[in-house]
Amino acid sequence: MQDELKSSFPTLPYSEEQDERFHQDVRDIERRYQGRWDVNMLADYCWMLRRETEDSKRKRARRGVKEKKKRFHRQKEYTCSVKYIMKE
C-alpha cells in the first residue's frame, strides 16, 4: 500500500524523519479506513496535514510587558497620524 502511494505521488527529496512520519500517518489512516483505499482516505490525509500546518502558524508568541507597551504605543502613534492625515 505505501509503495503504491510513493509511486503514485512523486515527491521531492525528503529526510528519514519525514519518511517515518509519512509512514506513521498512512498506517493511522489505514486503520481508520480499515484498509479500504478511496478518494476519501486521501482527502482525509490532506486535511489532516493542513490542520497541523495551520495550528503551527497560529501559535502565539509570549511577549513581556515591555514588548506589549512598545506595540501599543506604535499602534497609538499610527492611529494618531492617520487621524491627522484624514483631517487635512
Image (cartoon, rainbow, N blue to C red):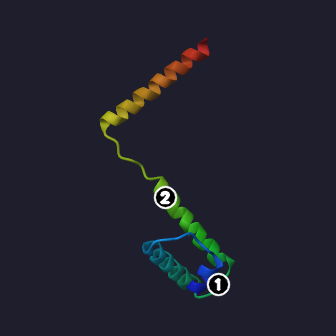
Residue 60 image point, x, y percent? 42, 49
- Is 6 rendered above or below residue 14? below
Dividing the image into 4 quarters, which one contains the C terminus? top right
| Residue 41 image position (x, y, % from top left) | 62, 78
Q: Residue at x 60, y 17 (%)?
A: 86
Horizontal relation, residue 85 to residue 16: left or right: right
Residue extending farthest top: 88
- From the top left corner, tell me how far across and down residue 33 is, in percent: 59, 83
Dividing the picture into quadrants, the one containing residue 40 is bottom right
The quadrant in which the N terminus is found is bottom right
| SS of the residue under disc 2 | helix
Residue corresponding to mark 2: 55
Q: Are marks 2 and 1 in contact (CB under 8 Å)?
A: no
Q: Residue 59: give its label.
A: none
Q: Residue at x 55, y 18 (%)?
A: 83
Mark seen at residue 37 = 1
Specify which label sits upstream in the sequence, 2 or 1: 1
| Amino acid under disc 2 | Asp
The residue shown at (64%, 72%) is 43
